[in-house]
Image: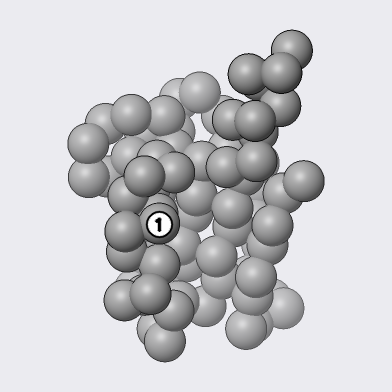
Amino acid sequence: MTQITTENPSVTTAPLSALDRCDSCGAQAYVRATLATGELLFCAHHAARFKENLAGTALAWHDESSRLLDERGA
């Protein structure tokens, strides 16, 4: 299940693809944090690490990390 949390309904969130890479480590991104100044992409590990720090400023938190469980079970 994709989790999308948004404070701003005008923020659009397109699905992430294998071409989207984590801004911290370059792994496949499963989370997009939309800020007033742009977007940050994170792998599941770095999303968990930075979520608390970004919670107050993110306009949207688009989380597709549940796809990791779907892919392992397939």
Q: Is residue 69 left or right of residue 1?
A: left
Q: In front here: 30 or 49?
A: 49
At 65% from the left and 41% from the top, the residue drawn is 66
Q: Is residue 4 above or below residue 66?
A: below
Residue 6 falls in which quadrant of the image? bottom right
Residue found at the far left of this picture = 25
Q: Is residue 7 above or below residue 42?
A: below
Residue found at the far top of this picture = 74
Residue 53 falls in which quadrant of the image? bottom left
At 38% from the left and 74% from the top, the residue drawn is 52
Q: Is residue 22 above or below residue 68?
A: below
SS at mark 1 in the image: helix
Residue 36 visible in the current orientation: no
Residue 13 visible in the current orientation: yes
Quadrant location of the C terminus in the rendered image: top right
At 59% from the left and 30% from the top, the residue drawn is 68
Q: In front here: 48 or 36?
A: 48
Q: Is residue 3 left or right of residue 21?
A: right
Q: Is residue 58 left or right of residue 16?
A: left
Location of residue 34 in the rendering, given as x and y in whole percent from the top left corner:
47, 66
* Amino acid type shown at disc 1: Ala
Location of residue 16 in the rendering, given as x and y in whole percent from the top left corner:
58, 38
Residue 7 falls in which quadrant of the image? bottom right
Dot 1 alpha-carbon crowd within 10 angstroms: few under 14, some 14 to 19, many 20 or more: few
Location of residue 44 in the rendering, given as x and y in whole percent from the top left corner:
44, 43
Q: In front here: 48 or 13?
A: 48
The residue carrying mark 1 is: 48
At 42% from the left and 87% from the top, the residue drawn is 56
Number of numbered discs: 1
How did the renderer colour the structure?
one colour
